[in-house]
Image: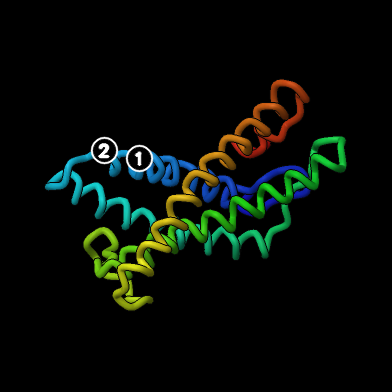
Amino acid sequence: MLKNTREDYGLVSRLLHWLTFFVVAGMLAGGLLLGVLPDGGIKSIVVSAHKSFGVLVFFLMVVRLLWRLENFRPRFLGSHLALRYVSEVLHVCLYVLLLIQPLAGILMSQAYGYPVGVFGWIQMPTLVWHSPSLGGIFSQIHSATAMILAAAIVVHAAAALKHHYIDGDRTLIRMLKGR
């Protein structure tokens, strides 16, 4: 089944979820790597890939958001209303962070005067003027959201594992394979 049902996530939701996860995990690792690499050839390759995958994350999240607006989420399997509320808030935070994070990176690069190419195929249109001080602001946003995003992902994964191992429900299974 492509679409979500009341009980399970459809194939499209699952593919978008896991594709986003793997790209973002690589992005976070790449971002950490950028902090320790010396300037030069390898770092410029990692920067280029980081920018390309950042643009991919942004557009993946736009697609996910549109898909989510057209497809309801399967019912919450937990028994506590407070946990359902926390789950909803965390999911909204993840979506917001996964849109702000790459956008801040794009704007940071452009404000510092660097183009944002996408896998060598196209170049993103310039959205902001050259301004190192503005670049510094976007850099701070990009760094802060990276840390918050990493923490939110850990909480999200821990909640899925709690559902599986402590509650014994299908929350994790239905994102892995559905029925």
Q: Secondary structure at mark 2?
A: loop
Q: Amino acid at mark 1?
A: Leu
Residue displayed at 38% across by 45% down: 27
Q: Position of residue 14 (x, y in %)?
A: 57, 45
Q: Residues within 10 Å of mark 1 (few under 14, many from 20)?
A: few
Residue displayed at 76% across by 29% down: 169
Looking at the rendered image, the quarter that the C terminus falls into is: top right
Residue displayed at 68% across by 33% down: 159
Residue 134 horizontal side relative to residue 20, left or right: left
Q: CA distance from mark 1 to mark 2?
A: 7 Å
Q: Position of residue 85 (x, y in %)?
A: 80, 47
Q: Nearer the viewer, residue 170 or 108?
A: 108
Would you say the residues marked 1 and 2 are in contact, meaning their CB atoms lie under 8 Å apart?
yes
Residue 33 horizontal side relative to residue 70, left or right: left
Residue 36 numbered mark, or none? 2
Q: Nearer the viewer, residue 55 or 151?
A: 151
Q: Position of residue 82 (x, y in %)?
A: 84, 42
Residue 120 numbered mark, or none? none
Q: Nearer the viewer, residue 171 or 51?
A: 51
Residue displayed at 60% across by 34% down: 157
Q: Amino acid at mark 2?
A: Val
Q: Secondary structure at mark 1?
A: helix
Residue 21 horizontal side relative to residue 34, left or right: right
Q: Position of residue 152 (x, y in %)?
A: 59, 42
Locate residue 67: give its quadrant. bottom right
Please, which residue is most extreme toward the top here? 165
Q: Residues within 10 Å of mark 2 (few under 14, many from 20)?
A: few
Please, which residue is most extreme toward the front here? 133
Check the image and report above or below for 19 versus 92: above
Residue 32 numbered mark, or none? 1
